[in-house]
Image (cartoon, helix red, strand yellow):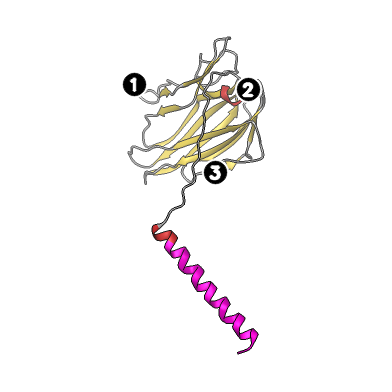
């Protein structure tokens, strides 16, 4: 047997042994690695900690937004906005919230709800926002659904998000949001039949603009 032939056979044996070891580890043996995390939760009104949702009257030091949070839609039916936890309260009397749940009673057809909630920055510095549709409209009677984000100061369209497909169809991300600015959020819906439906939209806010969220 030549040296060359011996090397080939040894190499093949090593491969099979290696595969067998991996199979054993994945089937019955675990290696433990631990991670301990210390979390310090404080109160702050700076940076991303002071960015959030609001409705009319919540944030007197931001441009007007959220003026139709309790508007009537049809008959005696009205929109309702339930706010989550307050994440920032300033000395000037502003309060911003980490979430909002919007209930919109509508009928079959096309509806446009203007300025239902606001989103503002009182953190003292520029932040960057990635909108992301977490869950889309699920009803088969939903023909279309969009969320539009407008600059509350001049009415410029910043982004248009398709909440039926989950895609951003206008605007670039991340969206730059300067200190002291606010957005007005509109909703455009069309349904062909009665339904109970929902979507969830998240805003990921960061003080850096290079790395996007998952």
Could you say whether the residue bearing mark 1 is in a helix, strand or loop? Answer: loop
Residue 23 magenta:
yes
* Residue placed most toward the observer, 43 or 97: 43
Identity of the residue furthest to the bottom in this view: 1
Residue 124 in percent (x, y) is at: 65, 20
Is 179 rendered above or below residue 214? above
Residue 76, disc: 1
Specify the quadrant of the image occupied by residue 7. bottom right
- Residue at 48% over, 32% down: 187
Query: Mark 2 sits on what residue?
Result: 181
Q: Does label 1 or label 3 sit earlier along the sequence?
A: 1
Q: Main secondary structure of the magenta part?
A: helix
Residue 117 in percent (x, y) is at: 50, 24
Pointer 3 local density, CA inside 10 Å: few below 14, some 14–19, many at least 20? few
Foreground mark, 2 or 1? Answer: 2
Foreground mark, 2 or 3? Answer: 3
Could you say whether the residue bearing mark 3 is in a helix, strand or loop? Answer: loop
- Residue at 57% over, 9% down: 91
Specify the quadrant of the image occupied by residue 109. top left
Q: Relative to 120, is 23 on the left or the right?
A: left
Disc 2 from disc 3: Cα separation: 26 Å
Residue 40 in percent (x, y) is at: 53, 25
- Residue at 56% over, 38% down: 160
Provide the residue span drawn in magenta. Answer: 1-24
Q: Relative to 123, is 200 on the left or the right?
A: left
Could you say whether the residue bearing mark 2 is in a helix, strand or loop? Answer: loop
Query: Mark 3 sits on what residue?
Result: 214
């Amino acid at each position: 047997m030549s040296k060359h032939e011996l090397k080939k056979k040894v190499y093949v044996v090593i491969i099979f042994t290696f595969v067998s070891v991996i199979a054993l580890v994945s089937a019955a043996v675990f290696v433990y690695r631990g991670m301990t995390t210390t979390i310090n939760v404080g109160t702050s009104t700076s940076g991303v900690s002071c960015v959030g949702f609001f409705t009319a009257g919540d944030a007197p030091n931001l441009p007007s937004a959220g003026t139709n949070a309790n508007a009537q839609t049809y008959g005696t039916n009205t929109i309702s906005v339930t706010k989550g936890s307050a994440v920032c309260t300033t000395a000037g009397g502003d309060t911003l919230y980490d979430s909002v749940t919007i209930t919109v009673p509508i009928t079959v057809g096309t509806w446009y709800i203007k300025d239902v909630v606001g989103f503002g920055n009182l953190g003292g510095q520029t932040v960057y926002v990635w909108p992301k549709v977490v869950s889309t409209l699920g009803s088969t009677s939903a023909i279309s659904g969009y969320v539009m984000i407008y600059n509350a100061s001049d009415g410029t369209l910043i982004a248009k998000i398709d909440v039926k497909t989950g895609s951003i169809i206008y605007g670039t991300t991340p969206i730059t949001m300067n200190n002291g600015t606010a957005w007005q959020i509109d909703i455009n819906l069309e349904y062909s039949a009665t339904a109970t439906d929902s979507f969830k939209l998240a805003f990921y806010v960061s003080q850096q603009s290079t790395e996007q969220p998952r």
